[in-house]
Image (tube, grey):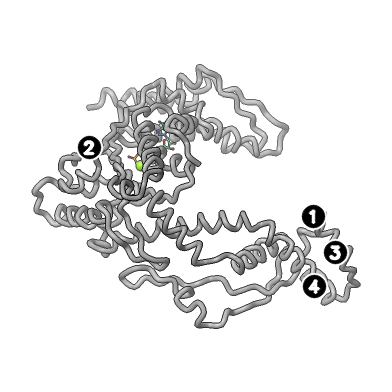
Amino acid sequence: MNLTPREVVEELDKYIIGQAKAKRAVAIALRNRYRRSKLPKEMREEITPKNIIMRGPTGVGKTEIARRLAKLVNAPFIKIEATKYTEVGYVGRDVESMVRDLVEVAVRLVKDEQAHEMQAKVSPVVQARLVDAICDSRRAQNQSVDKTIVQNDLKEGKLEEEQIEIVVKEEAKPMIAVGGPEITLGSMFDGLLPQKRKKKHMSVARAREILTAEETDKIIDKDNVYAEAIRRTEEEGIIFIDEIDKIIGKAGGSNNQDVSREGVQRDILPIVEGCTVATKYGNVKTDFILFIASGAFHIAKIEDMIPELQGRFPIRVDLDNLTKEDFKRILSEPKNSVTKQYSSILKVDNIDLDFSDDALDEMAEMAYAENETSENIGARRLHTIMESLLEDISFNATGQHPMLKVKIDRKYVQNAFKETKKKFDLKKYIL
Ligand SMILES: Nc1ncnc2c1ncn2[C@@H]1O[C@H](COP(=O)(O)OP(=O)(O)OP(=O)(O)O)[C@@H](O)[C@H]1O
Ligand SMILES: [Mg+2]
């Protein structure tokens, strides 16, 4: 999928309100990567991605933009917390694991794609195995069996819930971490140990899933999958480094924490600059992976980052504080807006919520005012407001009544918050 920057922004607009600059920046970075891939090889090698830092207060959409971007483009993507590497036991350790995790994502991506392509080939084989398993299971229960009838019933989807017994490979592979790269025990011994097989009871539907995975595995060319996964990781991978400001100490800081933070920056540097990381699928060059870093930068500044790392993030976008109008739109417009979420959740218990326009105004104003007077938590405030607004309904809805239409208007909102509002107002006077 090769979306133009404009198309990327349009897609992001469906979920994220405002933040036009940040949307444009990620859209351009993405497209530049595609443009680069069209160049002759010598030229391509010369151009490295322009990494991005998103700077902005909490809860204004930094993570959300990255997450949506990942879903949008079919690129291997992971999000990591920079702070993870300053935790006890992690210091100076294994930042390379972010690249290994990215490859895992790519492998899964490629495998899924190939499985999809092989569906036509695999599905008759699976169907045949299911027919045999159903016949065997019925015979084991002394039922008379007509294979043709079973075949037809299965085709018509009549047998999905029937319990059968099939032989499956033992799946669970223990994971161990030995102070270094994580190694999957199972895969280390792949081919050495005989595959354990086990009889299991399950529904036909579940058996189909398992057998499909098994049959697909048989015909997938693993080396091919791994090679493609590595190519995609190298050329299309995106790593989102969250909370990057938390690994920035004071410039010239000398306490332990500052030193360890700077250490993490030094560890991350080679990966962002371009190095080769060994993974169990092969070596991965990180030169063209796109990095998007994000942070609030309240205390530490971008300029406090070690210069080499700063240089690797030439594109900087500031995210805006959200306005009252933004809040109103966030409440109702995005495909997954909070009002839509709550409406669908409560519909399960026969409550049909209807938010009036002035209710949205009222909530947006409250969110804004609360962010001003107490802590500014951005759009997350809307979640807390919705939660307490609907607390009463959420508690009392049982589903044991006919569909109830509940109109939420300005009055309703004001009433619901009468008590708390008094508290807010008081706060203003208590110094
Ligand atoms: N501009 C926006 N449009 C729509 N929803 C938003 C917007 N900003 C934030 N949200 C919603 O608010 C919540 C928090 O946003 P997000 O995780 O992106 O914050 P953030 O900027 O990464 O903050 P932090 O610095 O704390 O990580 C999410 O549920 C998100 O859907
Ligand atoms: Mg975030």
Q: Secondary structure at mark 2?
A: loop
- Residue 244 at x, y percent in the picture: 27, 46
Measure how far apart labels 3 and 2 are at the Cα level.
Answer: 67 Å
Depicted 137 relative to depicted 295: above or below: below
Q: Earlier in the sequence, mark 4 or mark 2?
A: 4
Q: Secondary structure at mark 1?
A: loop
- Residue 401 at x, y percent in the picture: 71, 34
Q: Earlier in the sequence, mark 1 or mark 3?
A: 3
Residue beneath disc 1 = 157
Mark 4 or 1, closer to the camera: 1
Q: Amino acid at mark 1?
A: Gly
Mark 4 or 2, closer to the camera: 4
Q: Earlier in the sequence, mark 1 or mark 2?
A: 1
Mark 1 or 2, closer to the camera: 1
Q: Nearer the viewer, residue 148 or 65?
A: 148
In the picture, the disc for residue 278 is none
Residue beneath disc 2 = 298
